[in-house]
Amino acid sequence: MVRLLLENDPSIRVSISHTTRAPRKGEHDGLDYHFISERSFLDKIGNADFIEWAQVHGNYYGTSRSGIESVLDIGQDVLLEIDWQGARQIRKLFPQAIGIFILPPSQEELERRLRARATDDDTTITRRITTAREEMRHVAEFDYVIINDQLQRALHELLAVVRASRLLFLAQKHRHSNLFASIV
C-alpha cells in the first residue's frame, strides 16, 4: 500500500527506519531500511537519536529524529511505517500526527499473505502472526482504520485520509502561515 500511496501522491516522504534485523532478499540498505548492529542501535537509543523505537519480532526498529525533523522543517508530510508502540511514542511528541491502522480482513488472510510472500520461514511467520494479534488489540488507539480486503478500495481510503488531514485547521495554518497571520 505504501508504494501505491507514493505513486499517487509523490509529495509524501517515507521515513526509512533503522533495524537490527537482517535484510530480506531484495532489500537494500538505505532504501528499505538502515540495517545496523544491535550495539549501534542501542548507542543511538542512548544518544536520543530516535523519536520512537521498539523491539518487534525479536529485532529493534527505530525512527531517526534528524531524518523526520528535516522533512517536517520543509513542510512536507512524512509517513512512518511503525507499530502501535512507536505510534504511541509519536503521539506524545507530535500530537497533530494522524494515526492510521491497516487491518487485514481476517487473521487467516494475514497468514495466507505472509506465506504467499515467501520471505520468511515458518517460525518467523508464526511469530509475526502472534505479534499481529497483539498489535490488533491496539487498533482503538488510532484515528483511522482501513481494512485491506480489496487493495484498490483500501488505497482510495488511505488517499482520502491523507487528503483530508491536510485540510485540518492546524495543517492549513502551518502550510499557509502568511494568510492566517493576516486574518487573525
Image (cartoon, helix red, strand yellow):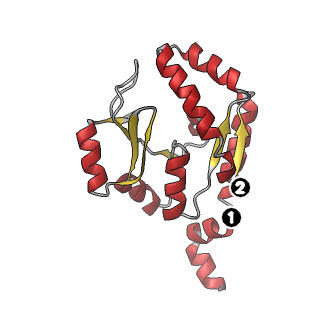
Q: Do the residues labelled 2 and 1 touch (CB within 8 Å)?
A: yes
Residue positioned 51% across, 46% down in the render: 80
- The image shows residue 77 at horizontal and vertical percentages of 53, 53
Please give the label number shown on residue 126: none
- The image shows residue 61 at horizontal and vertical percentages of 40, 41
Which residue in the structure is indicated by mark 1?
Answer: 168
Quarter of the N terminus within the rendering: top right
Horizontal arrangement in the rendering, residue 99 relative to residue 150 (left or right): left
In this view of the protein, can residue 4 be seen by the observer?
no
Horizontal arrangement in the rendering, residue 67 relative to residue 13 (left or right): left
Residue positioned 62% across, 77% down in the render: 179
Quarter of the C terminus within the rendering: bottom right
Tell me the kind of residue under disc 2: Ala
Callout 1 crowding tier (Cα within 10 Å): few <14, some 14–19, many ≥20: few
Which residue in the structure is indicated by mark 2?
Answer: 164
**What SS does tag 1 mark?**
loop
Residue positioned 73% across, 41% down in the render: 157
- The image shows residue 168 at horizontal and vertical percentages of 68, 64
- The image shows residue 100 at horizontal and vertical percentages of 64, 47
Question: Disc 2 versus disc 1: distance between alpha carbons?
Answer: 7 Å
Who is closer to the viewer here, 114 or 160?
114
Does 143 appear above or below 101? below
**What SS does tag 2 mark?**
helix
Q: Residue 151's quadrant in the figure?
A: top right
How many numbered discs sit on the rendered protein? 2
Who is closer to the viewer here, 5 or 179?
5
In this view of the protein, can residue 144 be seen by the observer?
yes
Tell me the kind of residue under disc 1: Leu
Q: Residue 48's quadrant in the figure?
A: bottom left
Horizontal arrangement in the rendering, residue 58 relative to residue 140 (left or right): left
Does 32 appear above or below 78? above
